[in-house]
Amino acid sequence: MAKKGGNRVIITLECTECRESGLPHVSRYSSKKNRRNTTGKLELKKYCRYERKHTLHKEIK
């Protein structure tokens, strides 16, 4: 039987370039991470539809 809670949590990734430019729209993705293996904030290169290119997306709380 599985434990309640677990180590996997749902996180939100937000585009850093959209956030810095001050535009009214920001590209966001949701993903899961294992909090035991990845204790820091997650950073991934994802596609931003507003910038129309792959940009760095950082985890937000």
Image: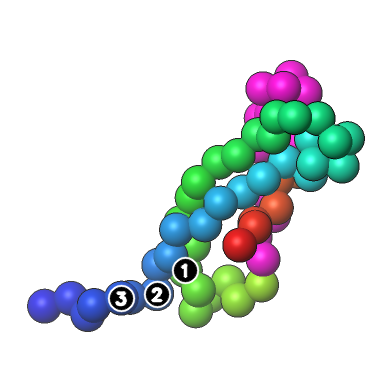
Q: Does the magenta stretch include residue 42?
A: yes
> At 61% from the left edge and 62% from the top edge, which residue is drawn?
61
The residue at which mark 2 appears reads as 7
Pinpoint residue 20: horizontal percent, then vertical percent.
87, 42
Q: Distance between the residues labelled 1 and 2?
A: 5 Å
Q: Can residue 35 be seen in this view?
A: yes
Q: How crowded is mark 2: few (under 14 residues within 10 Å), some or many (20 or more)?
A: few
Secondary element at image label 2: loop
Read off the magenta span: 41-55
Above or below, 49 relative to 30: above
Asked where in the image residue 54 lies, by quadrant, the reply is top right
Q: Residues within 10 Å of mark 3 (few under 14, many from 20)?
A: few
Q: Distance between the residues labelled 2 and 3?
A: 7 Å
The residue at which mark 3 appears reads as 5
Asked where in the image residue 46 lies, by quadrant, the reply is top right
Q: How far apart are marks 1 and 3 (CA)?
A: 12 Å
> At 11% from the left edge and 78% from the top edge, which residue is drawn?
1
Instruction: Tell me which numbered mark, 1 or 2, is placed earlier along the sequence.
Output: 2
Q: Does the magenta stretch include residue 50?
A: yes
| Kind of residue at badge 2 | Asn
| Kind of residue at badge 1 | Asn
Instruction: Tell me which numbered mark, 1 or 3, is placed earlier along the sequence.
Output: 3
| Kind of residue at badge 3 | Gly
Q: Can residue 45 be seen in this view?
A: no
Q: CB under 8 Å between callouts 2 and 3?
A: no
